[in-house]
Image (cartoon, grey):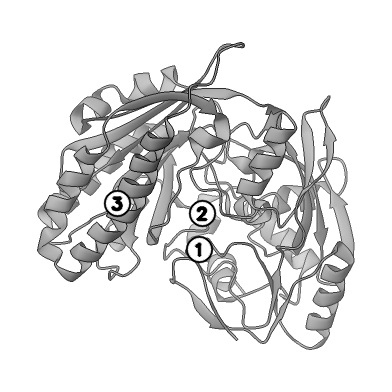
Amino acid sequence: MEWSNWAGTETTRLARIATPRSEEEVAEEVVKARDRGLRVKAIGAGHSFTGVAVTDGLQLRMGALTGVTTLDATRGEATVRAGTPLHVLNAELAQLGLALPNLGDVDRQSIAGALGTGTHGTGLRLTGLTGGVRSLRIVLADGSVVDCSPEREPELFEAARLGLGALGVVTEVTIAVVPAFLLHAVERPEALASVLDGLDDDIEANDHFEFYWYPHTDRALTKRNNRVDAGTAARPLPRWRSYLDDELLSNRAYELLNRIATRVPRTTKPISAVSARALTGREYVDASHKVFITDRDVRFMEAEWAFPRAALADVLAELKTWVDTHDELISFPVECRVAAPDDVWLSTAYQRESSYIAVHRYHRQARGAYFDAFEAIAMEHGGRPHWGKMHSRDVDFFRAAYPRFGDFLAVRDRVDPARVFGNPYLERVLGA
């Protein structure tokens, strides 16, 4: 059976598909596949742009293992089945008066898939999702199920918090949660030069700050999201405004504009100029997950790199210079964010305050030289690529980029010496 990921950047033929409904079934499927000489990959939404979850063997579809199983409000922890999509988890937590402290802007991924590739949001004082993992359960290549945490199997825990699916199949995660909170969102178009002039102030003054630069223009869309005081009432967007901005303009009209740009490339610059000014300023107060998440129905390819925080403006300036001096026509905005340092071995924010820049292309367009040019700039500024987004780096690069990379490989050698959970992508980034 053929399978392709969400963006269509990876395609494979599968020997077998299974949809386990319990942890025991996961273990049984892993052992059967191993005994038949099949490699194994668990899959969530298939939202990674790289081949991290690709297999030619057994694909475990984890969609039947969903939901919150236990809560510990005193410790601020929720235990969640690995196949739970983030949008389902957000809704369940909200019903319980809880929330994740930070999120990215997409919620289609499963919780295990988001953790396994290092999904993050924005905010100088907040880590990515992996920074909140307290413990997890994982099925290893021999079919054993291991509970791991900082106290139990600590080395496996440290590696598996962001494990790339290389160590086993995560079946359950205990993650930090907080009381549900509202965010005051202020979104508006601004001149790019003005945004960069006030960049440090905005990063430090706001709980969550990000902006999108529209190539071929000097315009950006800024987003400042801040927690409100207790007792503040929600003021969500009117339904008509939400439908106009998020459904008609950001999805339906944007899909049409990108199709036009693909068929008639010379329209790309005018389209980018129109897009940069189409979304006017707006301000509202709503539940955190409703503010963080942006509905994205337009499919695209993406590359994202993390840098030391101070490099953001320089990297963006070099990228803008490249776009302005080459013939590549780019119809998607460039996303810029920040995150706190963490101690997760393979996290892009390991031991440093980080800025992130993500570039995109419409999925029907050729990659061109854009992603390669961005990667070359990124490498000159100490960049680390997002594990689930497009890049060409290999094991030698990562060995130098991550101080605990050797420790991760040692854990992998111990728990999966036969590479039951291997695939070509992991062979490139982790070695055979």
Query: Quick one: 263 or 102, which is closer to the camera?
Result: 263
Look at label 2 and name its amino acid: Ala
- Point out the image quarter for the N terminus: bottom right
Dot 1 falls on a residue whose secondary structure is helix
In the picture, the disc for residue 396 is: 1
What residue lies at 29% left-to-right and 54% top-to-bottom? 254
Q: Earlier in the sequence, mark 2 or mark 3?
A: 3
Disc 3 packing (10 Å; few <14; some 14–19; many ≥20) = some
Q: Which residue is mark 3?
A: 377
Element class at badge 2:
helix
Q: Which residue is mark 2?
A: 400
Give the amino acid at mark 1: Asp
Q: In terms of secondary structure, where does tag 3 sit?
A: helix
- The quadrant in which residue 335 appears is top left
In this rendering, the label closer to the viewer, 2 or 3: 3
Question: Label 2 vs label 1: CA separation?
Answer: 7 Å
Which residue corresponds to the image point at 50% horizontal and 78% vertical from the top-left? 11
Answer with the quarter of the image where residue 13 lies: bottom right
Identify the residue at image location x=34%, y=41%: 244
Q: Is residue 32 above or below residue 27?
A: below
- Vertically, is 70 above or below 49? above
Please provide percent x and percent y for residue 403. Answer: 59, 47
Q: Type of residue at label 3?
A: Ile
